Image (cartoon, helix red, strand yellow):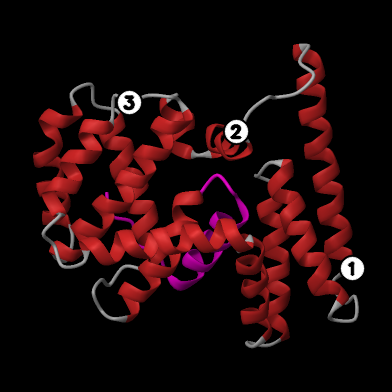
Amino acid sequence: MIVHLDKEQTRQMRRKLLADNSDIVFILFHDILKELHKKGETQLSAVEVFLSARQFACILLSMNEATEGLEDEIDDLEEEADGENDAMIISIVACAVIKAFAKAHAMSVYDDVVMAILVRWNDHPLFMPMLAGAARKEERRFAENKRNDLLGYELEQAAGEGEEAVSEAVRSFVDIAQNIGPDATMQLLLVLSRFNDNNGHRYQKEVDELYEIHKRTRSVIDMEVKGSGLSSLNFNNHVRQVVAHADVVEKYK
């Protein structure tokens, strides 16, 4: 249940999660999870926590009587984890994943599961810092549109490691674009184009390739909409992306 990744796997998955707006839970908890890892409160990276939480959420969502088996599942999680902190941190992020799923489907059936998890951990010393950290990130993100800054930051970090790291990061953006929707590819294109402009257009080939990928994914969506006879998808953008891309939604919709 608990996911462990090497450094390269962590880097690649982090970029994919930041590129794909469906993973709003990862974005909101990203900063506080990094802080907890840096302080030694958990040995798991932010990516490992999120992927573990998503798996834990999937297990609970697959159970018809999740509240009945919840305590046993948390006990199993705690037994597998290195300590109580990891089990608690994963559980809280799993709550957010479940809430995103329930909201996307206008379902309240999982409210009891979420509440039971919160009650289980509400006395833990990291409980309030985690919730407060995610809340602060949400306020900043919607006020300042921070997601694009995070993607740009990935490239700037790579630039500090040398040209080879930059080329690998740029290439990973193109690879990621093969598996995400047109809205997310557009965000990648904007970030990469800006970085390319600021670096003497050294990455024009990748920008052009990314643009072609975006056009293909956009045309596929347009054909699907026309084929269904709908003039528009008529979904709130956040909910639409959650429904379209989140692994947990795809598996249990």
- Residue 67 among magenta residues: no
Closer-to-camera residue (107/250)? 107
Q: Position of residue 73 (x, y in %)?
A: 15, 41
Q: Position of residue 70 (x, y in %)?
A: 14, 37
Which of discs 3 and 1 lies nearer the camera? The answer is: 3
Label drawn at residue 172:
none
N-term mark: 1 or 2? 1
Q: Which residue is mark 1?
A: 204
Q: How many angstroms separate mark 1 from mark 2 (CA)? A: 31 Å
Determine the image quadrant of residue 207: bottom right
- What segment is highlighted magenta in the picture? 1-23
Determine the image quadrant of residue 142: bottom right
Q: Which residue is mark 3?
A: 108
Q: Is residue 47 visible?
A: no
Label drawn at residue 240:
2
Up/down of 196 relative to 51, above or below: below
Helix, strand or loop at label 2? It is: helix
N-term mark: 3 or 1? 3
Q: How many angstroms separate mark 2 from mark 3 (CA)? A: 18 Å
Amino acid type for the residue under numbered disc 2: Arg
Label 1 crowding class (10 Å Cα cut-off): few <14, some 14-19, many 20+? some
Q: Position of residue 208 (x, y in %)?
A: 89, 58
Q: Which part of the image, by quadrant, shows the C terminus?
A: top left
Please report the residue visible at 61 percent of the width from the left and 81 percent of the height from the top.
157
Helix, strand or loop at label 3? It is: loop
Of all residues shown, which one is farthest toward the top? 229
